[in-house]
Amino acid sequence: MNYKKRSLDPTAIPTRDFHQYLLGSVAPRPIAFVSTLDEEGRANLAPYSFFNVFSSNPPIAVFSSNRRVSNNTTKDTLHNIQVSKQAVINVVDYSIVKQMAIASVEFPSDVSEFSKSGLTMEKGEVVDAPMVLESPASMECTVDDIITLGEHGGAGHLIICTIHRLHVRESAIDETGRIDPHAMDLMGRMGRAYYVRASGQNVFPIVQAVTKICIGFDQLPEPVRTSDALTGNELASLAGQYEIPDAEKIQEVLRGYAAQDNSVDKQISLIKRLIQEQKEADALALAFSLK
Ligand SMILES: Cc1cc2nc3c(=O)[nH]c(=O)nc-3n(C[C@H](O)[C@H](O)[C@H](O)COP(=O)(O)O)c2cc1C
């Protein structure tokens, strides 16, 4: 791996270019598919990927509507929210991602992106702005604050929302009452025109209890910690375990893999294989046999 980095000073390169470097670096981003109503009650729908939730109690979502870099104008979503102080944030799954892209087109303000994108309005319980029926989760929000971050093209307006209802598609909730990430099939925005689909083997658990103290890299036996054959993630599956194996466990594993007479290199390839086969406890015992 070549770790050399390109250093970018936002004041020294055009905003357009810095914006692209930012989008490519802070990715994938979740997509807020925001519906609002204008003063005449016409629905507006647009995607915003400068978005996240920042608090659960109270439940707060924030997204940013930026001044266009090309002509420093602001967007319909912002105008509508300044007046109505409400919005629905819908999330975007794979099944509607191309419809979402159509809704991002800069149609005139009096044109509803619902009609253009072929998506369906659904009435919520709390706010007047419509939800997107086809979205797997919709949040009905009121807007608490709009923070203006600058006056030039590219400047954001942080739109801080309290979530009053979260509507989640029933079929995405499993028998334990929790959301199945595979069933959500959510999309993320990358840099340039790239997206990522959260599905298949790209959606996987990493179980690391935050309240249980783990071993850490510094405690791994030196030949293992400094080995070029093991990646950072492979070493982390050893260092992330909670107990250093005792002599008995080490002997048992050495016997099991008939690994007593092997060289350090051979032991390390065996450790690597065991990690890849998800036999992490055995790999850790072998690692500590090299201490
Ligand atoms: C996936 C995606 C994410 C976007 N994220 C943002 C964003 O975070 N902030 C922003 O100002 N524009 C963002 N845009 C561009 C707006 O969606 C676009 O300017 C849109 O026309 C605004 O619509 P409106 O004027 O109806 O609000 C994004 C576009 C796409 C396709």
Image (spheres, rainbow, N blue to C red):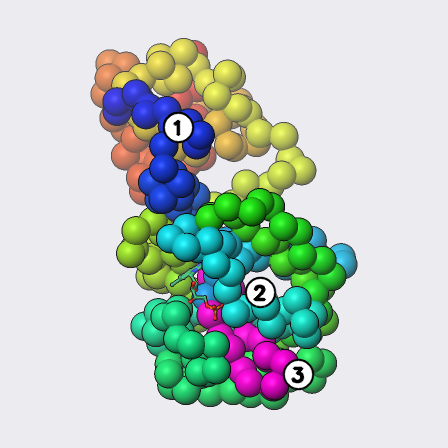
Task: List the residue tagged with mark 1.
Answer: 12
Q: Nearer the viewer, residue 244 or 160?
A: 160
Disc on res. 165: none
Q: Quadrant of ligand 1?
A: bottom left
Write down the residue under mark 2. 78
Whether the residues at callouts 1 and 2 have beta carbons within 8 Å, the answer is: no
Cβ(mark 2) to ligand 1 < 8 Å? yes
Which of the marked residues, 1 or 2, is nearer the chain's N terminus? 1
Between 191 and 166, the one lying in front of the other is: 191
Is residue 222 or residue 84 the one in the foreground?
84
Discs 2, 3 touching: Cβ within 8 Å = no
Q: CA distance from mark 1 to mark 3?
A: 44 Å
Task: Report x, y in % for residue 54.
Answer: 65, 52
Label 2 and label 3: CA atoms lie apart by: 16 Å
Q: Is residue 138 visible?
A: no
Q: Upstream in the sequence, badge 2 or badge 3?
A: 2
Q: Secondary structure at mark 1?
A: loop
Mark 1, other Cα within 10 Å: few <14 / some 14–19 / many ≥20: few
Which residues lie in the magenta part? 28-46
At label 2, which amino acid type do we have? Leu
Measured along the vertical axis of the image, is residue 200 above or below residue 168?
above
Mark 2: secondary structure: helix
- Identify whether 63 is placed above or below 82: above
Residue 38 drawn in magenta: yes
Residue located at (66% from left, 83% from top): 128
State the separation of the CA atoms marked 1 and 2. Answer: 29 Å
- Picture quadrant where residue 115 is located: bottom left
Check disc 1 and give the amino acid type. Ala
